Amino acid sequence: MSAMKKSNDPFWWTLFGAGGAMTAMLVPMLLFLIGVATPLGWIEGPSYASVSQVMLHPLTKIAAFFLISLSLFHWAHRFRFTLYDGLQLKHLFQLIAVICYGGAVAGSLVAAYVIW
Amino acid sequence: MPTNITLEVLRYMPEDGGAPVFQEYEVPLRSDWVVLDALNHVKDHIDGTLSYRWSCRMGVCGSCGMMVNGEPTLTCAAFLESFAPGPIRVEPLAHFPVIRDLVVEGSDFMTKLKDVKPWVIRKEEKPLSEGEYRQTPEELADFKQYSMCINCMLCYSACPVYGLEPGFTGPAALALAQRYNLDNRDQGNEERMELLSNDEGIWSCTMVGECSEVCPKGVDPAGAIQRYKLAGAADWWKSLITRKSK
């Protein structure tokens, strides 16, 4: 145990964990309701007007932003290690970290722009 | 039912200067025999030069771990019949240097075990006259699972991260650290967190989960490490806030 360097992984891991938990809880249900059950007519979905009304509520906007942003950070953390270990690109660790987390930050900014 | 099964055993004899080669042995396919029994049969009756480690034959000592058909396996718990009709490929545990045949050099693991301070740490010992440290069954249950490790090193062999980064503290040692962290008699959490919350400790783990798949004792090192990460992350945020407020 030579390297005692403090890791900044706890920060990224927190976002990763929060994103994973949130995505696992909400996305399958949303996909099923909005993407499968409603179009196939299994349930009568809400009208466009009522959905857009819900989406315009400030709390819905915040929730949607966190869902999208944290999912992206979940992806970023996992993809970073996929590139490190899966493709053996550990020597490019700085570049990979910038691309992955930078991508998540950029995606979050786009999400914020679209939502607000 | 065939009466024999073929073992393909990796042989490496450094004194010969040769490269490792597979050697085939025909052994009786008995329903009550495990791979270790077959190796013992080879050693006793076919080829006395074969080297491997074993001791208890009952899944307690953790000595007889080997790669069986590419999977880290306790050979005393792997029945020949489950591999019929064979052949069964037996190799030394992956990710460790090989000393000879099926014997690996495990001192890296032994060092790491010691590094996590796997003993009850007290800030202050209470005097003997005050008696023992008592524990309820619930308090015991908090860590008992993590105390079942037999140091067989199968999890290190299964862990792709350890294969890529030998500096990684690794599954069994981190699970053992958790065994003490979660023990209510122990007060060494902070000390161990200092040692293990770094890029070679808990944060090296990418949660592949193979360690828990191969563990013959149901220790679930992957789960232990994830819990450790949660504690590590909480600790990190806390230290961030307290540093700011100073």
Image: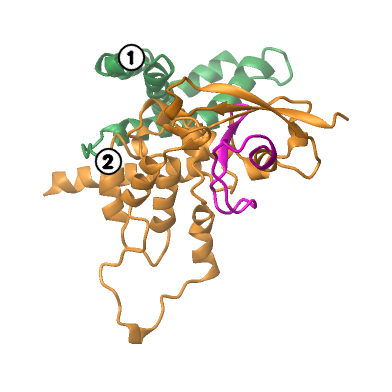
As drawn, the residue found furthest toward the right would be B1
**Chain A pictured colour:** green
User: Could you say where residue B207 lies in the image, as x and y percent from the top left?
Assistant: 46, 33
User: Could you say where residue B164 lies in the image, as x and y percent from the top left?
Assistant: 39, 25
- Label 1 and label 2: CA atoms lie apart by 33 Å
User: Could you say where residue A45 lies in the image, as x and y percent from the top left?
Assistant: 65, 19
Magenta residues, as a range?
A: B42-70
Residue A107, placed above or below residue B2:
above
| Numbered disc in front, either 1 or 2 | 2
Among the chains, which one is orange? B
Badge 1 element: helix
Instruction: Name the residue: 22% across, 36% down.
Output: A3
Residue beneath disc 2: A1
Q: What residue type is labelled 2?
A: Met
Q: Which amino acid does label 1 sit on?
A: Gly
B217 part of magenta stretch: no
A95 displayed left or right of B48? left
Which chain contains the residue that carries disc 2? A
Residue A95, placed above or below residue B126:
above
Badge 2 element: loop
Q: Which mark, residue A103?
A: 1
B46 part of magenta stretch: yes
